């Protein structure tokens, strides 16, 4: 194959190699190959166990791969998460900060009613951020 595309077992840094080295399972890799999304960000989402079809939506909500993984591990779905935050009346541009701070939609709604802002949630999110620890 003269395409320059590297498959399993070949060294040299082709688009699939980073996924393989990160231990991404083949079925997860396939979801990213289908979308032709091979950059470092894609590898981070795949390594977190987030399907390539859902990762862009989680990302559009402002979540990071580790935050989406935490939700996924609790059994949350993407559709259910969007629905729950929408029903709680939390503005879409605040959702990631509240989630990152570790609050549920109900808790975030209660905090907003007490005058706690998304900026406060963002500060707590930054303190919880694994990248800074």
Image (tube, helix red, strand yellow):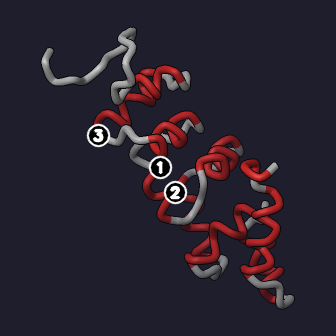
N-terminal label among 3 and 2: 3
- Label 3: state its secondary structure: loop
- Residue 120: horizontal and vertical position, in percent? 80, 78
Q: Which mark is residue 55?
A: 1
When the figure is inspected, residue 110 is found, relative to residue 122, above or below; the finding is: below
- Label 1: state its secondary structure: helix
On the picture, is 35 further left or further right than 55? left
Pick the residue in front: 118 or 18: 18
When the figure is inspected, residue 87 is found, relative to residue 42, above or below; the finding is: below
On the picture, is 72 further left or further right than 8? right
Instruction: Name the residue tied to disc 3.
Output: 36
| Pointer 3 with pointer 1, Cβ within 8 A | no
Pick the residue in front: 22 or 66: 22
- Label 2: state its secondary structure: helix
Instruction: Name the residue tied to disc 2.
Output: 58
Question: Which quarter shows the N terminus?
Answer: top left
Q: Which mark is residue 95?
A: none
């Amino acid at each position: 194959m003269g395409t320059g595309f590297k498959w399993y077992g070949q060294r040299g840094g082709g688009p699939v190699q980073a996924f393989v080295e990160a231990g991404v399972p083949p079925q997860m890799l396939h979801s990213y190959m289908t979308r032709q999304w091979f950059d470092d960000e894609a590898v981070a989402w795949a390594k977190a166990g987030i399907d390539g079809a859902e990762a862009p939506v989680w990302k559009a909500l402002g979540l990071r791969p580790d935050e989406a993984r935490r939700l996924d591990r609790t059994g949350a779905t993407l559709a259910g998460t969007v629905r729950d935050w929408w029903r709680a009346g939390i503005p879409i541009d605040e959702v990631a900060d509240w989630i990152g701070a570790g609050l549920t939609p109900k808790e975030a709604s209660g905090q907003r009613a007490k005058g706690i802002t998304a900026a406060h949630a963002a500060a707590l999110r930054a303190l919880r951020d694994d990248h800074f620890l």
